Image (spheres, grey):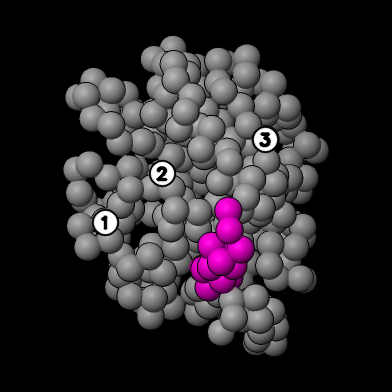
Amino acid sequence: MNKIKLDELKSISSKIRIGIVESIAAAGSGHPGGSLSCADILTYLYFEEMNVKPEDPKWDARDRFVLSKGHAAPALYSTLANRGFFPVSDLITLRKIDSYLQGHPDMKGTPGVDMSTGSLGLGISAACGMALAGKISGKDYRVYTVVGDGESEEGQVWEAAMFASHYKLDNLCVIVDLNGLQIDGPVTEVMNPMPHDKKLEGFGFNVITIDGHDFEQIEAAFAEARKCKGKPTAIIAKTVKGKGVSFMEDQVGWHGQAPKGEQTEQALAELSANANI
């Protein structure tokens, strides 16, 4: 990846993080930690990897994306807005009673959302169904889904993994957002699902482990996933919860609370410096 492209992606991801913070602050509730941790993955997906048309969100040939960890909706919304699916100015309506930006993704009301999610484990299952449908219908779209490491404590996640391997869904790419924290504390202490790589290999996946904030590693991982045939790919993305906001990074308390006042100002100042704006 050349330096110009790398700098562009870093700037975009900072703008997406700004949207995350602004929307959650305006709502007075939400999930900043896990939204910030997956922002770089979503940036690469929507600005480099996926074949989508913001002007035609339901375009039949588009690649599909499912945010299985649906509570990180602010990250998806900010990504979609910055990609042109709807106005960035609408992000501050998050969780408002008359807004189309609900607390969890809604495929019926939000342009660009391919699947309604929130109940953990259901998103990856829906993504598997989309991928199988593509195979059956002879279409060449790809399906991507982001799963939380805490979410992977759900048995349904592993049923979906078994399904994906059984049907040889090489058009499916599962990204595990491995930030190490969930609402009740460290994932390894609440209900340890590790090691993701060995387990997914055991289920028949092509497994790639990366730094989920390194765009060059992200680029290489998705390129490898596209080349893999005969089995689904899982990308284990090691990330930092709250990435980009110093006082939120790796702090479990920021799983599900909104910044206020000076906290919001500090967060936006830090992110704006990285976004070149």
Q: Nearer the viewer, residue 30 or 36?
A: 36
Q: Label 2 sits on what residue type? A: Val
Residue segment shown in magenta: 1-16
* Label 1 or label 3, whichever comes before in sequence order: 1
Crowd tier of the residue under label 1, counting other residues whose Cα lies within 10 Å: few below 14, some 14–19, many 20 or above: some
Residue to which mark 3 is pinned:
209
Residue 139 placement, left or right of 4: left
243 left or right of 18 in image: right
* Amino acid on which the number 1 mark rests in the picture: Lys
**Main SS class of the magenta portion in the image:** helix
Q: Is residue 211 left or right of residue 71?
A: right
> Measuring 28% from the left and 23% from the top, which residue is drawn there?
135
Q: Which mark is residue 66?
A: 2
Q: Nearer the viewer, mark 1 or mark 2?
A: 1
Q: Position of residue 219 (x, y in %)?
A: 56, 46
- Residue, disc 1: 53
Q: Is residue 128 visible?
A: yes
The residue positioned 51% from the left and 38% from the top of the image is 223
Crowding near the residue tagged with mark 3, few <14, some 14–19, many ≥20 C-alpha atoms within 10 Å: some
Residue pictured at 78% horizontal, 36% vertical: 188
| Depicted 244 relative to depicted 259: above or below | above
Which residue occupies the foreground of this view, 96 or 246? 246
Looking at the rendered structure, the secondary structure element under dot 2 is strand
Q: Which dot, 2 or 3, sits closer to the camera?
A: 3
Query: Which residue is at a point 28% across and 61% down the rendered structure image?
Result: 54
The amino acid on which the numbered mark 3 sits, given as a three-letter code, is Thr
Instruction: Tell me if I can see residue 183 in this picture.
Output: no
Which comes sooner in the sequence, label 1 or label 2? 1
Quick one: SS at disc 3? strand
102 in magenta: no
Q: CA distance from mark 2 to mark 3?
A: 20 Å
